[in-house]
Image (spheres, rainbow, N blue to C red):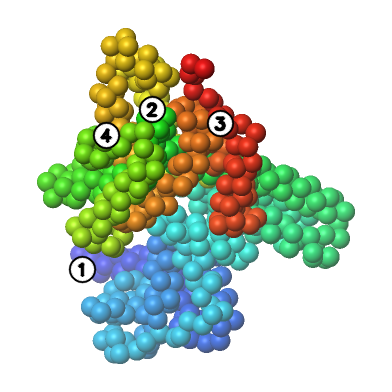
Amino acid sequence: MMGWRRRLAAGALFLLTLAATPVLADDRALSELLAPLCAGASAERVAAVDRLLDAVETGAAEPAWALRALEAVGGRRLVCAEGGVFITSGTGVIDAVTSAPGLADAVKAQGAFVDLRLRPYLDMGSAVLRLLASPGGPASGAALGELQKRAKIVPPGLIERAAAEPANAALAPGLRDVMAVAALNDPDPALRIAAIGRLAEAPSERNRTLLRDLSGDAALTSDPVVAAALADGITRIERWLTLGQVAASVYSGLSYASILFVAALGLAVIFGLMGVINLAQGELIMIGAYATFLVQEALKSVLPGLVDYYLLLAIPFAFAASGAVGIAMEVTVIRHLYRRPLMTLLATWAISLLLINLVRVTFGTQNLQFNVPPFLNGGTHVFADFIVTWNRLFAIGFALAVLAAALVVLRRTSLGMYIRAVTENRDMAGCVGVSARRIDLTAFGIGSGLAGVAGLALSPIYTVNPAMGVNFIVDAFMVVVLGGVGSIAGTAAAALGVGMINVTIEPMFGAVAAKVIVLLLIIVFIQFRPEGLFAVKGRR
């Protein structure tokens, strides 16, 4: 009986030894992979990084384990001591292979210095391993950006494996572009041609530069088929880049025109109806921006959950604040100066100075800090280098909404009919029972309120301070005069024209010269058509 038990124990011990032998062998192999990373020449450590990535590609090492090792090398926390390779931290030491507690003496050691030759390989390796260890994780976007910078040294097999991960689906096009860049220097001409075609399908300034650099390499372009593919790819990219630049200019012009239109619309109503040159219109824009700021601060204190929507919630407050100031101006000052344009000009200029200094005393002279709502951050890539940014799209959409609301009020309501009647023939409108004084007051309030709404639209994209309105008053008057005094459609058309001309000229001559050229063009146009683009109907 005892012999049987002895034989059973010996057999069990043999099986355990047999099972443990591969584990020990695997641990030894992994330790040998990491040992060259502890110290040595840069070339040896770079080769060790490549071998570690090869081990991950063949399945000999796990991505998470290899990522931990490379991050330890980058932080100088991977040390080799008697008994193995260890990772140090503020809390202790662990074995780099088994994660078991390590030697206490290793805490005092420090990993080798990471020089400029090794750093790109560490960053590249960490990025690709991060996409494999935690696909779709919060650091995936940054990892893709790092791989795009190091595309010439990436391992194509691991990149292809990362692109195949379902969680990395959003990054897959970018990862395939990285693979294409890596294949540009492949000795196989077929792979180079396929990579050139892939880059040509994703036109960008970066890809054009890559292909141009490749076209200058006589060794790589000695094959006529490769050279022809390169020339065709560069031509296709340049064509799309030109279209992208045109689209970006049009988009920028539309957003600038939207800002001009919203800023000039209130002035068009006031100037067109009453002929009052309101030099305080810019300060009414400023009041709307400050009202928006107060709404933002109030929401932070009372309803912080709604602070992301402060721009939408502040619309009635900005309109009411500027409208109330405008009504007070009309009742106390402007009403007594009708038909005296010079006095009105001086009075509104004095009011503008009063408002600027009142705001300076109340809020200070510093620029206000606005939170950019999440729905205005970022944008979407359309094609080539053309990106639709949400803040510019908001400005365009907001201007269209204001235009639609103004047209509905002026064309579809009795108030709009009275305003149009007084604008076309004030005396005749009075004869049929329209109170011109009341319409003047209402229109001045609406025009001032529209200026406040313009300030709201400008607040997240423009510098808000007490003097901000001064920069808009000249542009607003240019748009109103060019479009036709009192014409909403003319104001929109003039703003669009001025915006498009400005963004076309500015890259060539600069912002100041562009503004001067636009002003000269408007002066020349007014010489031939003094009534503007759209003249308001009137009795002649």
Crowding near pointer 1: few (<14 within 10 Å), some, many (20+)? few
Crowdedness near tag 3: few (<14), some (14–19) or many (≥20) residues, C-alpha within 10 Å: many
Mark carried by residue 335: 4
The amino acid sitting under disc 1 is: Met
Residue 380 appears in view? no
Q: Position of residue 7 (x, y in %)?
A: 29, 67
Viewer-nearest residue: 160 or 55:
160
Residue assigned mark 3: 532
Between circles 4 and 2, the one closer to the viewer is: 4
Foreground disc of the pair 2, 1: 2
Tell me the distance, in whole angstroms, between the alpha carbons under discs 4 and 1. 121 Å
Identify the residue position indicated by label 1 in the image.
2
Amino acid at pointer 4: Arg
Could you tell me the amino acid type at mark 2?
Leu
Task: Indicate left or right for 186 with 331 as reference.
Answer: right
Mark in front: 4 vs 1: 4
Residue 298 seen in the current view: yes
> CB atoms at circles 4 and 1 under 8 Å apart?
no
Residue under label 2: 273
Which residue is pictured at 30% across the width and 90% down the height?
108
Considering only vertical position in the picture, is 436 above or below 445? above
Percent of width and height locating residue 234: 75, 51
